[in-house]
């Protein structure tokens, strides 16, 4: 494998749509009725929506590629989580997914670090992450980087409502080692 991380561009919208759909479906697809899953994917991961995100100056997406084929991605931008302490200028890790074939090799952590570095490129600020309440592995990863559970919300996929945690790391917090 020749894995590499690169910043995605608007031209990558079809690739991002494909890898976002694939990783979400492989990770969480079993949790939802098929109609709910397909409606969510059509709304959230369409090529058109990915092009808008990729073209927006306040958002950034990275692709993890294996010989030029996307096998993971991360996305970051302004915080949109429903928490009363979210302030203008706060950043959010929006997505972090890698295919099972490249998990446990440190590449998810590298994607995560690329997003954190970009989110703090203009200086320290409060960072947020929404994570499924049952995704214990992701919660451990985020906890190692100084993120703490500060709230809850519902993530809606069709008629399904997932219990999600809101995690936050303050601008002066350093990740634990």
Image (spheres, rainbow, N blue to C red):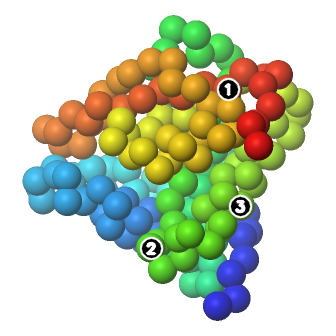
**Mark 2, residue position:** 100
In terms of sequence position, does the residue under pointer 1 or pointer 2 come before the other?
2
Alpha-carbon distance for marks 1 and 3?
18 Å
Alpha-carbon distance for marks 1 and 2?
27 Å
Is residue 148 or residue 62 the one in the foreground?
148
Q: Image height check: is 67 above or below 125?
A: below
Q: Which residue does the image show at 58% across and 10% down from the upper left?
A: 85
Q: Report the quarter where the N terminus lies.
A: bottom right
**Mark 3, residue position:** 110
Numbered disc 2: secondary structure: helix
- How many numbered badges does the structure rendering display? 3
Alpha-carbon distance for marks 2 and 3?
15 Å
Is residue 50 or residue 33 the one in the foreground?
33
Residue at the far top: name it. 84
**Mark 1, residue position:** 169
Q: Image height check: is 2 above or below 45?
A: below
Q: Report the quarter where the C terminus lies.
A: top right
Q: Position of residue 115 (x, y in %)?
A: 70, 49
Residue 26 occupies quadrant? bottom left
Q: Image height check: is 120 above or below 152?
A: below
Q: Are marks 1 and 3 in contact (CB under 8 Å)?
A: no
In terms of sequence position, does the residue under pointer 2 or pointer 3 come before the other?
2
Q: Position of residue 72 (x, y in %)?
A: 55, 68
Numbered disc 3: secondary structure: helix
Q: Position of residue 13 (x, y in %)?
A: 54, 66
In terms of sequence position, does the residue under pointer 1 or pointer 3 come before the other?
3
Tell me if mark 2 has few (under 14), some (14-19) or many (20+) residues whose alpha carbon lies within 10 angstroms of its own.
few
The label on residue 136 is none
Is residue 124 or residue 50 the one in the foreground?
124
């Amino acid at each position: 494998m020749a894995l590499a991380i690169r910043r995605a561009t608007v031209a990558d919208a079809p690739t991002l749509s494909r890898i976002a759909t694939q990783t979400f479906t492989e990770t969480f697809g079993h949790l939802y009725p098929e109609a709910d899953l397909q409606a969510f994917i059509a709304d959230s991961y369409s090529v058109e929506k990915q092009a808008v995100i990729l073209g927006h100056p306040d958002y950034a997406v990275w692709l993890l590629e294996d010989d030029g084929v996307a096998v993971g991605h991360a996305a970051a931008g302004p915080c949109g989580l429903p928490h009363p302490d979210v302030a203008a200028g706060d950043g959010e890790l929006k997505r972090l997914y890698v295919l099972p074939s490249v998990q446990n090799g440190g590449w998810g952590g590298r994607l995560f670090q690329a997003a954190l570095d970009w989110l703090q490129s203009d200086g320290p600020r409060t960072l947020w992450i929404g994570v499924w309440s049952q995704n214990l592995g992701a919660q451990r990863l985020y906890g190692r980087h100084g993120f703490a559970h500060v709230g809850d919300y519902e993530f809606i996929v069709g008629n399904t409502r997932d219990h999600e945690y809101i995690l936050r790391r303050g601008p002066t917090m350093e990740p634990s080692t």
